[in-house]
Image (cartoon, rainbow, N blue to C red):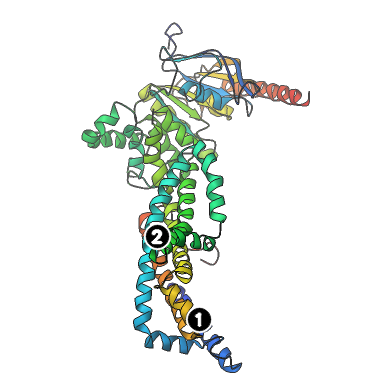
Amino acid sequence: MSRKLLGQLMPVITLLGLLLLWEFGCIVFSVPEFVLPKPSRVIETLITSFGPIWFHAQHTLMTTLVGFVIAVVVGVLLGVFVGSSRLAYQALYPLLVGFNSVPKVALVPVLVVWFGIGTAPAILTAFMLSFFPVAVNVAIGLATLEPELEDVLRSLGASQRDIIIKVGLPRSMPYFFASLKIAITLAFVGSVIAETLASNVGIGTLVEQASANFRMPLVFAGLAVVAAMGIAMYAIFAGIERRMTSWATRSTDFGIGG
Amino acid sequence: MSAAATPLVDIAGVRLTYGGIDGTLAVDQLNLTVAPGEFVAVVGPSGCGKSSLMKLVTGLLAPSAGSVSVAGQTVRGPVKIVGMAFQNASLLPWRTTLDNLMLPLEIVEPYRSRIGRERASFQQDARKLLASVGLAGFESKFPWQLSGGMQQRASLCRALIHQPSLLMLDEPFAALDAFTREELWDVLQGIWIQRGFTTILVTHDLREAVYLADTVHVMSARPGRIVASYKVQLPRPRTLESSFLPEFSHLVQKLREHIRTERGAADAAQVA
């Protein structure tokens, strides 16, 4: 088997290995199902309860994507603003860090007071959790422009706008696409948290209700679906990143042991 | 290159202070004139304010006192008739070599407003320029596909594409190996002879200064000013053979003495 194929199969092999270990652990120690269900039971539930799971999963996916899109737009605008002006950086960066340190789970009740139970708090939580990496990465890409290059452009009479458009933005693209991968997974975290606390649809709600009824296989089935959606989205954005910024990721081989 | 011609660059009694009134005095009492078409090298101990000199001439920094004029006009903002190249080639990795050369044309007038219609003819000029430094056939390569020496050639071309009358070089070959460096001395000398622009080369390499320049100026330790100037009388084009002539080594030796004295003065000032 070629090394490349082996590398691609490795995650699947690891996952299967972990599931087997889990399955046998449950059997050997006779773990009760309401504590930790066997993976075979989780898979069984995934199939038998496909209808309701799919209904809730769709909802979570939409909520997450809407929150994520808002986060990308706001994150890029904020990042450009903070990254292109020293004053804006000094004024806003500490605030951003402070806001990012607030546990968003504590803000969900506030959102419920403002917007009521439902989709809006979930979208906003997804947005609040995921705009930060986008903003920071875009700002870093802009702020780490080589001073010599800036001198070259300035001496030619380039305006701040010229420099951002010709050099700053293209240069921050690798940072931007890298941040999308992180942001999309954070958006899932945000929407599921809000659904758990303040919604009546979505995987978060499903998991919350299932665990209240001690239906552990359904809880784990819901979590597995969120993980699968997260991986799928991550893979999509990793693919986009590779296509868009091939100049920045020329070599994907690791230095040691290639 | 008659001395009577109006100088292209005239720096008179310039002082530059960084960071407010109590800031560091970078240069003081700096006087320097460069005739049109002249190739000038500026050497000095590290931290002598050579980079300040670059920024003063290109209008990126305004002097705290004194005046800087380029082409007969007092510098009050970015001087667009200048091309710049640095130790770091700083080419844009997402652009091909040819597109990297086009960058200044997308910014500086009058090219900026003409590039939409005349891109093809500008690209033709860029190809010619690349060919003249030995980069024919590398137009569509990306910077990271080029060696360090090739990147530096491309950086030189980018500095020259808008046909500036003044080329400012800040240790452009310092990061290259000795053989590549000597190769690029000839490339630079060749294109300078061919195009006749004025050049100010800031360098630590005394052999480089003597090899390339008509006049070598020695800068003092901070606050920087010119403490000695030497005309290099060796005939053009200079070759590696010229660098083995006794005049050549004699001049390099004299410059080295100056730098040693200046470094000593700087150390003494630090102790005191």
In terms of secondary structure, where does tag 1 sit? helix
Kindly identify which residue carries mark 2.
Answer: A67
Q: State the residue lying farthest toward the top.
A: B4
First in residue order: circle 2 vs circle 1: 2
Disc number for residue A211: 1
In the rendered view, tell whether residue A119 sits above or below residue B148: below
- Which residue is rendered at x = 56% and y = 46% of the image? A94
Q: What amino acid is labelled 1 in the image? A: Ser
Distance Cα–Cα, label 2 vs label 1: 26 Å
Residue A153 in the image, given as x and y percentages of width and height: 41, 32
Judge by depth and name the residue closer to the eye, A3 or A66. A66
Q: State the residue lying farthest toward the left.
A: B117
Q: Residues within 10 Å of mark 1 (few under 14, many from 20)?
A: some
Residue A251 in the image, given as x and y percentages of width and height: 45, 59
- Which residue is rendered at x = 44% and y = 61% of the image? A126
In the rendered view, tell whether residue B27 sits above or below residue B90: above
